[in-house]
Amino acid sequence: MSSKAKYNVLMMRDNTPVRRYRVSPLWLKLALYFLLVLLAVAGAGGYFGLTFWKENRVLREDQAASQRELRELHIELERLKNIEQILKSNAAKEPSDQATPDTAKTPPAPPQPPVDLSRIFTRTDMQQVRVDNMQARINGERHIQVVFNLNNLQTEDAIAGSASLAVVTNDGKDKQPQLNQSDLVFQIQRFKQIATSFGLPAGLTRGEVFGLRLVIKNNEGQVIFSDIYPLARILS
């Protein structure tokens, strides 16, 4: 075929004259190459786009895990500070070894039972739920409002159960307030905000409250989460 040969393209339509276009083989080849290059660029763009999306998802998951670890470290730091405060408070209450002559004549006071720190700061986490943004507000002197976010860590299944709150006093004892259980029952797929309010147990003042103990159980009664929140840290 001659290099000057051209293709004839006929355009025929009813009731109109026939139109003929002469196209060089070079233009046809260029059009074909352009189409192939366009398909290659589109394929490469789709591949790199999918790769970058997967990497971005991994980075987001790593960021979320780092934030969870940071929150847990912050809670652990607060727990250690509270333990230090309790130990200092107990040490201040111990009688001095060097007694004055007047105090030496008086009989020593009976020893106070030590505060069981291991019981106070016992924490349970079955990695089924996560508690975020725990906040408390005191109205007046005896009424407490509590709000927290409950997240389901089981991405495939919903989770149901109930939560309970106890007031922890400065001497390490748990006092059970009158709770509205309907506020604390949950069934969530991903996330739920839980809010409730209650009055302090009888005979207990605000100054005697150290913190709140949150216990979450599933429908089988198994404790899947338990932690103590010092009141000074969650007051809003």
Image: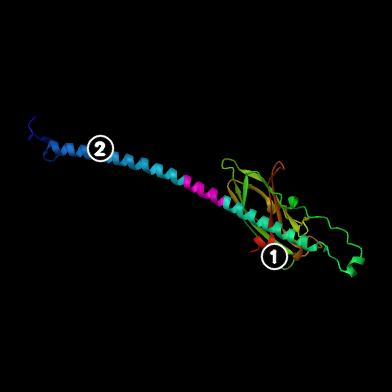
**In-image side of 189 versus 124 (left or right):** left
Query: Residue 103: x and y, percent?
Result: 89, 68
User: From which residue to which does the magenta span run?
Assistant: 58-68
> Disc number at residue 36?
2
Query: Residue 233: x and y, percent?
Result: 65, 61
Label 1 vs label 2: CA separation? 71 Å
Give the quarter of the figure containing the C terminus: bottom right
- Residue at screen point 61% across, 43% down: 158
Q: Farthest residue to the bottom: give it.
A: 102
Q: Quadrant of residue 177?
A: bottom right
The residue type indicated by label 2 comes to Leu
- Residue at screen point 25% across, 39% down: 37
**Of residues 34 and 205, which is closer to you in this image?**
205
**In-image side of 71 versus 106 (left or right):** left
Secondary structure found at label 1? strand
The residue type indicated by label 1 comes to Ile
Query: Residue 131: x and y, percent?
Result: 63, 52
Q: Is residue 13 visible?
A: no
Q: Main secondary structure of the magenta part?
A: helix
Q: Earlier in the sequence, mark 1 or mark 2?
A: 2
Q: Is residue 3 magenta?
A: no
Give the quarter of the figure containing the N terminus: top left
Q: Is residue 145 above or below residue 33?
A: below
> Disc number at residue 16?
none
Q: Is residue 63 magenta?
A: yes
Question: Residue beneath label 1, please?
Answer: 138
Count of marks, rendered view: 2
**Of residues 144 and 167, which is closer to you in this image?**
167
Query: Residue 66: x and y, percent?
Result: 54, 50
